[in-house]
Image (cartoon, coloured by chain):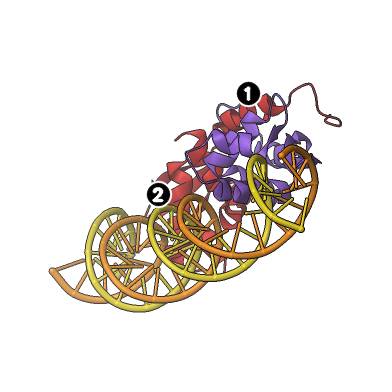
Chain colours: A red, B purple, C yellow, D orange
DNA sequence: TTCCTATTTAGAAAATAATCTAAATAGTTT
DNA sequence: AAACTATTTAGATTATTTTCTAAATAGGAA
């Protein structure tokens, strides 16, 4: 649940795409899997990592499991990145 | 050199610590290695990845190689993270 | 030139991560 | 209950990453 998990989670392109998909609305696991050329079990594995990192939440409905984005977890990452912006570098914003 | 490389680079705790070290001033490869319980060759490998990601620059002086932080590369990452902050989430800032 | 010192590169080994197949779980519908 | 649908879990396999040892490079000092 620490920043370390967040960064690990978003270091994988598949997981980033999942987050981007969930940007607009929640999707069921199967719907998410349909977007990738991967087995459902594999996507389920990625969802588990995202969930562990706190980047998504799940909600059961019927026999579906809907996943939703939780971008608030990025706060620590943003803080860390900004902390690296010292006053000596040539061309940062 | 894309965001993908940046995120891969900072997904490793050793590399994050290296960046934190370089926050204040440039250090020679050997000085950086001294901060870790790892072989110099291993640290050199991490420096190579950070360099490839554009997160550090190098400058030769005598037979030392000084590494310096380049945090400007984070711009894309910040943009991506912010793009995930849609208007529907409960508690983001 | 020969000897140091700093660092990287090459290649192998160890550790971790991503993917697949097959089986298990769980809730729905009939 | 039995059959169906959605999804996860277990275990094996493959791929990628991290680390190490040993050798190579390169520049400075004797």
Count of number-bearing discs: 2
Same-subunit check for callouts 2 and 1:
no
Residue B43, horizontal then vertical, whole percent: 58, 45
The chain containing the residue under callout 2 comes to A
Q: Residue at x 37, y 53 (%)?
A: A62
Residue B84 shows in the view: yes
Disc 2 on helix, strand or loop?
Answer: strand
**Among the 4 quarters of the image, the one containing residue B74:** top right
Q: Is residue C10 above or below residue A11?
A: below
Q: In front here: B82 or B55? A: B55
Give the residue at mark 1. Answer: B93
Give the residue at mark 2. Answer: A61
Disc 1 on helix, strand or loop?
Answer: loop
Q: Residue at x 58, y 39 (%)?
A: B33
Q: In front here: A28 or B15? A: B15
Disc 2: CA contacts within 10 A as few (<14), some (14-19) or many (>=20): few
Residue B89 shows in the view: no
Residue B58, horizontal then vertical, whole percent: 77, 42
Q: Residue at x 44, y 35 (%)?
A: A1
Q: In front here: A49 or A84? A: A84
Residue B37, horizontal then vertical, whole percent: 47, 39
| Quadrant in which the C terminus of chain B appears | top right
Residue A57, horizontal then vertical, whole percent: 46, 41
CB within 8 Å, label 2 to label 1: no
- Foreground mark, 2 or 1, reads 1
Q: Residue at x 66, y 24 (%)?
A: A83
Q: Residue furthest right?
A: A91
Q: In front here: A91 or C21? A: A91
The CA distance from mark 2 to mark 1 is 29 Å
Whether residue A88 sits left or right of residue A73 in the image: it is right
Disc 1: CA contacts within 10 A as few (<14), some (14-19) or many (>=20): few
The chain containing the residue under callout 1 comes to B
């Amino acid at each position: 649940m620490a920043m370390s998990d967040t960064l690990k989670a978003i270091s994988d392109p598949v997981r980033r795409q999942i987050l981007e998909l969930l940007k607009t609305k929640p999707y069921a696991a199967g719907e998410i899997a349909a977007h990738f050329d991967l087995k459902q079990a594999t996507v389920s594995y990625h969802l588990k990592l995202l969930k562990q990192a706190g980047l998504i939440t799940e909600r059961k409905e019927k026999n579906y499991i809907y996943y939703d984005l939780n971008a608030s977890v990025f706060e620590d990452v943003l803080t860390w990145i900004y902390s690296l912006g010292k006053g000596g570098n040539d061309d940062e914003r």
